Amino acid sequence: MKHVFHQGSSTKKPTFLLLHGTGGNENDLLPLANHIDPEASVLSVRGNVSENGMPRFFKRLAEGVFDMEDLKARTAELHEFIGKAAKDHGFDRKNVIAIGYSNGANIAANLLFTYSDALKGAILHHPMVPNRETELPDLTAVPVFISAGTNDPICPSEESTDLERLLKDAGAEVHLHWENYGHQLTMPEVEAAKVWYDQL
């Protein structure tokens, strides 16, 4: 998968797995990662799916309607890639925290829904429930930050509250943060994610 890797100044810090939104690329979230923890390493990935020329991490059938077969395959592909990247770049596979926005947050959430050991934690900006038909693995004590917009036209509020409940039921420690904005990624929610991260 097309990606950039930046070695952090502290090997004790996590590696941030950056996952962009639809139409984004591997450079979009680099400033965000640097703001949250400038000492962390960064593995920023470009989605392998193209929708009318816009990079995505998996196909969709319509707005908010996921291609579940493709989601499953692409999640497995990403999971395998993280393991390979850890060997290639020499970072700790067990110390990876995802930072995803929109489509990127959805595939990060599906990593959590699929594998108990895929991520040490996750920051999910405007995610939806990736799969309502699956049984989640044991996510005991996995920290997850979710930011959501009260009037997000793409991601209804119940998607956020349902995701929170499903993750908590699997044992994850979830913090749900609300902003009175739409679907855009805003500085106040990035600041809230940093405050949450600093307390880990």
Image (cartoon, rainbow, N blue to C red):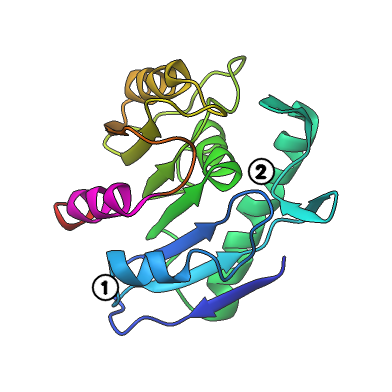
Q: Amino acid at mark 1?
A: Lys
Element carrying mark 2: helix
Residue at 78% across, 38% down: 59
Residue 189 or residue 182, whichever sits in front: 182
Question: What number is the disc on residue 12?
Answer: 1
Q: Quadrant of the N terminus?
A: bottom right
Structural distance between the alpha carbons of marks 1 and 2? 27 Å
Splitting the image into 4 quarters, where does residue 25 fall? bottom right
Question: What number is the disc on residue 112?
Answer: none
Q: Is residue 150 magenta?
A: no
Q: Is residue 194 magenta?
A: yes
Residue 157: image x %, image y %? Answer: 42, 20
- Label 1 crowd (10 A; few <14 / some 14-19 / many >=20): few
- Tell me if label 1 and label 2 are in contact, CB under 8 Å: no
Residue at 53% across, 25% down: 129
Residue at 44% across, 53% down: 99
Residue 79: image x %, image y %? Answer: 61, 51
Residue 18: image x %, image y %? Answer: 50, 60
Splitting the image into 4 quarters, where does residue 39 fall? bottom left
Q: Residue furthest left?
A: 199
Mark 2 — residue?
75
Region of the chain picked out in magenta, as a range: 186-196
Element carrying mark 1: loop
Q: Amino acid at mark 2?
A: Thr
Residue 80: image x %, image y %? Answer: 65, 55
The majority secondary structure of the magenta stretch comes to helix
Label 1 or label 2, whichever comes before in sequence order: 1
Q: Relative to 147, say whether 64 is above or below.
A: above
Residue 16 or residue 27, whichever sits in front: 27
Splitting the image into 4 quarters, where does residue 3 fall? bottom right
Report the label total: 2
Q: Is residue 53 left or right of residue 33?
A: right
